[in-house]
Image (cartoon, coloured by chain):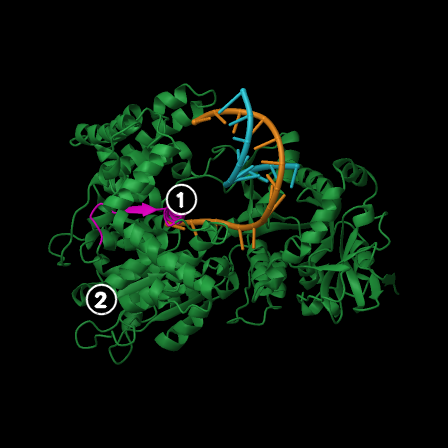
Chain colours: A green, B orange, C cyan
Amino acid sequence: MRQIIIGTMHSDLLLNLNPEQREAVTLPPVNPNGQAQSALILAGAGSGKTRVLTTRIAWLIQTGQVSPIGVLAVTFTNKAAKEMIVRLSAMLPINTRGMWIGTFHGLCNRLLRAHHKDAGLPSTFQILDTQDQLSAIKRLLKGLKVDDEKYPPKQLQYFIAHAKERGQRARELSVGDDFQAKMAQLYEAYDAQCQREGVVDFAELLLRSYELLKHNESIRTHYQERFRHILIDEFQDTNALQYAWLKLLSGHEAGQVNVSSAGSSAVFAVGDDDQSIYAFRGADVENMRLYENQYHPMMVKLEQNYRSHGHILDTANFLISNNTDRLGKNLRTDAGHGEPVRIYDAPSDHAEAAWLVDEIKALVSSGIKRTEIALLYRSNAQSRIIEHALFSAAIPYRVYGGLRFFERAEIKHALAYMRLLENPNDDTSFSRVVNFPTRGIGARSIEAVQDAARVQQCSLYLAASTLDGKSGASLSGFVRLVDHMREATRHNTLPETVEFVIQNSGLIQHYLSEREGQDRVENLQELINAATAFIAEEGYGQDAAAALLPGEGAPGVVAVSPLAAFLSHASLEAGDNQAQAGQDAVQLMTVHSAKGLEFTAVFITGLEEGLFPHENSVNEQNGLEEERRLMYVAITRAKERLYLSHTQSRMLHGQVRYNMPSRFLEELPSDSLKWLTPKAKEARWGGSSSGGGRTGSAWQDGYTRQRDSETNDFFDSGRENRQPAKQIGRVGSASTTVKRMASPPRGNYPFTIGQNVFHTKFGEGRVTGLEGNDADARAQVSFKRNGVKWLQLSIAKLTAIE
DNA sequence: CAGGCCTCAATTTTT
DNA sequence: TTGAGGCCTG
């Protein structure tokens, strides 16, 4: 009854929804027993996921089931959060500013700023981005005199991040061997260093606020009671810590449920297990199943696709059905079949790029805008040759990825000065700018400072101010400079402070005198604009504390300075990447970064074994299924036109490689495909396949890693064991490579890709790759019984069979 | 302390 | 092939 009334009253909100979307939006957040009822929305690609999420919030508010203050909506990217806020503002005449809509990291930062004391942090704590974290780790290792060959900083960084993402502190780790024990010890030392310096890394933001909520009952209860509705986007991308955080906040954590007062909150999770492509950074789809078991959510599947034409959608569905571990979902469309999916088999990477140029020209002259054309690849290295071809053909393009505004060196330098104004204990920032621009403080003086700091148990900044001696003058000069800037800007507005700092630090002057420093000077000027915009858009310090208005009663809430808020903003939102913006340009990006986007025409390039699926993935747990999901994501970006291409030869790591076409091409429905290079398929695959399903053969079992000490005539597909091959390869001179490129690529090997072969020890197999020259020519063979191996053709006892 | 030379490695990315 | 990082020299 109530449902009907609500549906009528708010038909404007629900008007544009299809039945399944409407069902999702209006799922009752309370069950008949009066308890919170959670929901899981399985939202396929292009099914209107964001619309459902935002309409859900609007519906809850408009029907009076919650006030804006009582909603927490969390996303992974700033872009998604922003879009949600914009759409919500368009739906409801409310002030979204005070609402808790943001990224995990943004919201956690807000929480920690507001309760820094309870979280054990200084009010001025700074956030380390990935770069900062790595330099902090290097500094730590140096200080402890740890051999960084044995304990590589990058690896330690990964170790720490992943431990934190699982919610584990150093002491909670179970260490299997000495190496792990040492890593754990270094992790602990790293945390101690961060604590001393008043800095937190990205994972720490989450872990620290998790611990804050866990250990502080009054704060926990406050937020549990406040946020009666928690909504999560891209749920399949959550890691263990994020899930734990969610359980705590929603009152579902075992032992923490506060039935009498707070009770639990209604969680509304939206996700798509088929689009889970971030396992490598800790995301765990398993959270979807855990959620099902622990929250008993009502489930709605959004399977109506509004993006892609029929052939494209069929292709995506057909491919993904090869995955075994799915929650189950099939997209459908009302659009017609549309164009078939076109497949191009190029002889070389150059030819592939040339073909791309031709097709793009044709599409553009047929009236498709260049921004509506995407060129996708599995790895960034593939963009170079495509860029080259586009550039030569004078086709404007834009490459996604790369450095972003707040990650640029000159910007980070300026921010480091500002961070020192806020928090002199920030040794990472100190180290970054103590001698930049150069002021005669070399490695020796810095070492002296570090020693002094260690002895006195104080920050580098403080140590520097007390040091006398040779470099003492320049060191204390630096300290005086920073002190002076702090004093002088005390009563300035944020943009004034930025301007003062970039002038007085000498940064501007330094780049003005540099030959190619003009761009950097402009970027520094732009930083002033960014500060102005930040104040205008975000409001005074709103990032941290604005939502915690007086009277809301969160205990111990503290306000935050505009500078602190801006510095957080700079760390948490790295800004746009250097955009050749504005223009109508073709879009180049990795498949990963294409997630969430859509284009009229999409090219998926480099569909070759070893590239896509990537050769590293076949050794990883469930790696192939993840690669397949990646392919699924790529396909579902296309609205009207989809092109797939692969090449027979490709320059990779400075060597020409010959790869099989991707197995994914074999997993597509032949009825939806159009091969632009006829016969290619039959010739390569022995005509045994007619699309759909994989051709049954040895490599269907995947690449098993094997090692055999008795033979030395192969190198398996693992990188470690490829070393011998590489060394031999280096013997071949550059001129040999050029010659080979000039000659027909496949002629000089005794075997061809796809050919069946027999090896005296490993038995029957199929050639899946060729590389190297002459004496060190090698073949990759997938054996029926012995997995994939690289064989040195001059040694291996390999014969061709029918 | 800057710039040249050598070695080595080489998915995917957000915060 | 390209890029990063380390080391040595002017």
Q: Residue at x 16, y 50 (%)?
A: A558
* Mark before the other along the chain sequence, 1 or 2: 1
> Label 1 is found on which chain of the structure?
A
Residue A341 placement (x, y as % from top left): 67, 54
Please rate how many residues cluster around mark 2, counting C-alpha atoms within 10 Å: few if below 14, some from 14 to 19, many from 20. few
Residue nearest the observer in this picture, A69 or C2: C2
Q: Residue at x 47, y 49 (%)?
A: A148
Question: Residue A127 in magenta?
Answer: yes
> With A227 as the anchor, is A151 left or right in this view?
right
Residue nearest the observer in this picture, A236 or A95: A236
Residue that label 2 marks: A215
Quadrant (top left, top right, bottom left, bottom right) of the C terminus of chain A = bottom right
> With A799 as the anchor, is A211 left or right in this view?
left
Note whether A382 is above or below A236 in the view shown: above
Question: Residue A467 in magenta?
Answer: no
**Secondary-structure class at tag 1:** helix
Q: What residue type is disc 1 on?
A: Ser
> Label 2 is found on which chain of the structure?
A
Q: What residue type is disc 2 on?
A: His
Q: Residue at x 84, y 51 (%)?
A: A749
Residue range of the region highlighted in magenta in the rendering: A121-144
